Amino acid sequence: MYVLIAFLTPILHALSCIVDAHFSNNIFKKVPSLVFYATITNIIIIPFLFFFGTPIIPPLEILAILFIISLIEVCYQIPYYHALHNIDTSIVVALFALGEVTLPFLAYFIVGEKLSFLQYLGFGIILLSTFLLNFDSKKFKLNIAFVLMLLVSVLLSLSAVLSKYSLQSVDFVTVVFWIALFATSISLFLLIVPQYRSDIISAFPHYKKKIKLFLFNEILNQTGTLAMIIALAYLPVLVVETIGSSQSIFTLLLGFMLYKIFGNRFKENLTRHDVVKKLISFTFIIIGIYMVLR
């Protein structure tokens, strides 16, 4: 049962990434406007937090850390949405695996934690697979999305470490409350820049028209995260993380299904050659993640 719950995370987050790609490629012309509206939608989760408890005012040190996490939560979206402009959604999702590489290396440089040969081999498999997915042999050039998602992965890895640190002092209700509040406040600063403010205002009709889809996307994100938390309470971390790494495969499968229903509205190349190449690369990425997490 809990294995099935664990699979909800990659499935729901895969669908959320497909919606993100739709917003990025078909609805909003400029990334800052999309970041603004995607972030302020997060505020809807605050009332529901009170079902689980009451947030408190944490110590100043924790409050500062939560602000940094919120800043990361806003800033990582910029390279993320730009990556969705450049490559297929399933490949963008696969590149989140780069975060599995950055975390252990951060641990090595910060606390001197040494790694096994099998873990280094796993790193190599992940890097080679993601590299081949983004390397254009005809132009002999690496897709810029690889660099963008490497930045995203480093930022999210740092956010994960800081969140873990915060949860040692306060409960998850307080953490989620302040992150949502700070992130919304930070996004409001985009209104200070005249060119951003102008586009945000002009994009409001698009947001208003798609508000239900934004809310649906937020529900997908939050439910997927909740499923992961529940699964972690009953399953080994290795199992949950390995299951979660299947998200790129679900993104490809769901993208194919949505293509059949809605047509070519989502950024995904579904030729036989590309699908086979992606599936092989995604499988090796999952194997690499399993080896890293052993």
Image: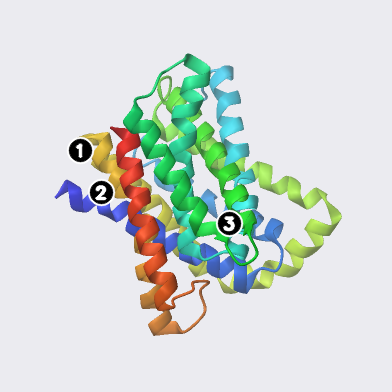
Residue topped by disc 3: 38
Image position, residue 209 (x, y; %) = 59, 74
Most foreground residue, 47 or 34: 34
Q: How was this image coloured?
A: rainbow
In this rendering, is residue 293 above or below 202? above
Numbered mark located on residue 135 in the image: none
Look at the numbered discs 2 and 3 and tell me whether their residues touch, using CB distance below 8 Å. no
Amino acid type, label 1:
Leu
Indicate which disc, 2 or 1, sits on the residue closer to the N terminus: 2
Residue 235's label in the rendered image is 1
* Mark 1 surroundings: few (<14), some (14-19) or many (≥20) residues within 10 A: some
Query: Could you give the CA–CA distance between mark 2 and mark 1, rounded to whole angstroms?
Result: 9 Å
Give the residue displayed 41% in from the left and 63% down from the top.
278
Residue drawn at point x = 56 percent, y = 49 percent: 149
How packed is label 3: few (under 14 Cα within 10 Å), some, or many (20 or more)? many
Name the residue beneath numbered marker 2.
6
Residue 186, given in percent of the width and then of the height, sits at: 67, 42
Q: Residue furthest top?
A: 112
> Could you tell me the amino acid type at mark 2?
Ala
Q: Residue at x 58, y 38 (%)?
A: 70
Mark 2 in CB contact with mark 1 (< 8 angstroms): yes
Disc 3 or 1, which lies upstream in sequence? 3
Q: Amino acid at mark 3?
A: Ala
> Could you tell me which secondary element the residue under label 2 belongs to?
helix
Toward the left, the furthest residue is 1
